[in-house]
Image: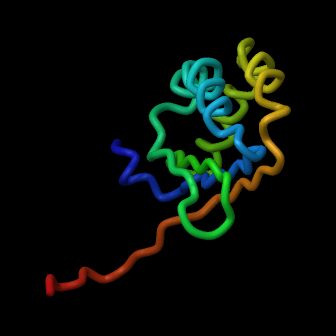
Amino acid sequence: MSHLNKPLIDHRIYTIALRKMPEFVEVFNRLAMPLLLETLGHPVGFYTSLVGPQNQFIHLWAYDDLADYERRCKARDSHPDFPAYLAASGHLITAQETRLIKAIGMPAWPSL
């Protein structure tokens, strides 16, 4: 099933210390992504803030339901490489928000 068909999205926002985004992205790619791909699967996408609050790194992950989310998060949190990522990134992250958002049915809109 494609992540586009999964109704539950984990919407994470990390606020990164001023002028530390390049260092955070390097640490994230090197230490977090291998274990996240193994435990969470492929992400919906990664974004940085352009307008509004600055220095934010946003990532989205799709799940079938709350049980799927809990199972995969438990796998991530118990992965033997996860503590190394947490230790390497802790000084770079100043705040974190985690939201679970769910899809709603919307009517098909005609092309304009």
Q: Nearer the viewer, residue 30 or 9?
A: 30
Count of numbered labels shown in the rendering: 0
Say which residue appears at 57% left-offset and 58% top-offset.
49
x then y, percent, for residue 20: 71, 38
Q: In this view, does 4 lie to the left or right of 18?
A: left
The quarter in which the C terminus is drawn is bottom left
Q: In this view, does 87 lie above or below 18?
A: above
**Coloring applied to the structure:** rainbow
Say which residue appears at 64% left-offset and 19% top-offset.
31
Say which residue appears at 37% left-offset and 54% top-offset.
5
Q: Is residue 8 left or right of residue 70?
A: left
- Which quadrant of the view contains residue 51? bottom right
x then y, percent, for residue 37: 51, 26
Q: Nearer the viewer, residue 45 or 47?
A: 47
Q: In this view, does 80 lie above or below 105?
A: above
Q: Nearer the viewer, residue 49 or 6?
A: 49
Say which residue appears at 72% left-offset and 31% top-offset.
74
The quarter in which the N terminus is drawn is top left
Q: Residue furthest left?
A: 111
Q: Is residue 58 left or right of residue 104?
A: right
x then y, percent, for residue 56: 65, 53
Q: In this view, does 95 lie above or below 85?
A: below
Q: In this view, does 36 lie above or below 99?
A: above
Q: Which residue lies furthest to the top in this view?
A: 80
Q: In this view, does 84 lie to the left or right of 65?
A: right
- Which quadrant of the view contains residue 107? bottom left
